[in-house]
Amino acid sequence: MEQEKNILIARRTPPGDQWCLVDDEKQTVYNSLTETLEGYFQVYKKSCEFRLAPLKGEIYMITTENVEAPLPKKFNIYGD
């Protein structure tokens, strides 16, 4: 079973549509959402899907990982 995981990659830096990557030591300020996503690709060379949380001012990278589904619990009273 695949499970979706959101990893925070950028936060909005007021005023307006300015963003900084969370792992960027230089704290480069990007002047738009598009520039921020391009900056992420240039730094990490990783193609992925993104999720925007506009009220929080955050951008997330969406990843999926395979997780084994738990086995159903067995009960002795049913003769399992």
Image (cartoon, rainbow, N blue to C red):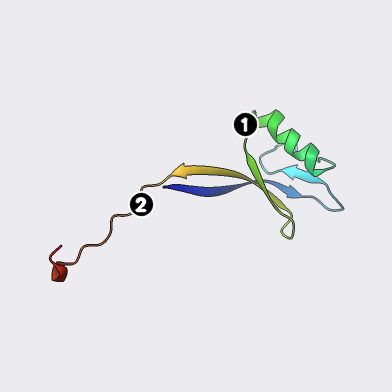
First reached walking from the N terminus: tag 2 or tag 1: 1
Look at 32% across and 54% down and name the residue there. Answer: 70
Look at 16% across and 69% down and name the residue there. Answer: 78
Question: Vertical placement of 43 versus 10: above or below?
Answer: above
Return the residue at label 1. Answer: 46
Residue 28 appears in the rendering: no
Q: Is the C-beta separation of discs 2 and 1 under 8 Å?
A: no
Residue 22 appears in the rendering: yes
Question: Vertical placement of 10 versus 72: above or below?
Answer: above
Q: Amino acid at mark 2?
A: Ala
Look at 74% across and 55% down and name the residue there. Answer: 57
Q: Is residue 61 left or right of residue 80?
A: right
x, y percent for residue 42? 71, 29
Where, by quadrant of the figure, is residue 33 drawn? top right
x, y percent for residue 3? 47, 49
Where, by quadrant of the figure, is residue 79 drawn? bottom left
Using a 10 Å C-alpha cutoff, classify the residue at mark 1 as few (fewer than 14 neighbours), some (14 to 19) or many (20 or more).
few
Return the residue at label 2. Answer: 69
Q: Of discs 2 and 1, which sits in the foreground?
A: 2
Using a 10 Å C-alpha cutoff, classify the residue at mark 2 as few (fewer than 14 neighbours), some (14 to 19) or many (20 or more).
few
Q: Is residue 37 left or right of residue 64?
A: right
| Quadrant assignment for the C terminus | bottom left
Indicate the secondary structure of the residue bearing disc 1.
Answer: loop
Q: Amino acid at mark 1?
A: Lys
Closest to the observer, 10 or 47: 47
For residue 74, the mark is none
x, y percent for residue 37? 73, 38
Q: Is residue 42 left or right of residue 67?
A: right
Question: Vertical placement of 8 versus 47: above or below?
Answer: below
Measure the C-alpha gap from mark 2 to mark 1.
28 Å
* Outermost residue toward the right in this view: 15
Look at 70% across and 38% down and name the residue there. Answer: 24
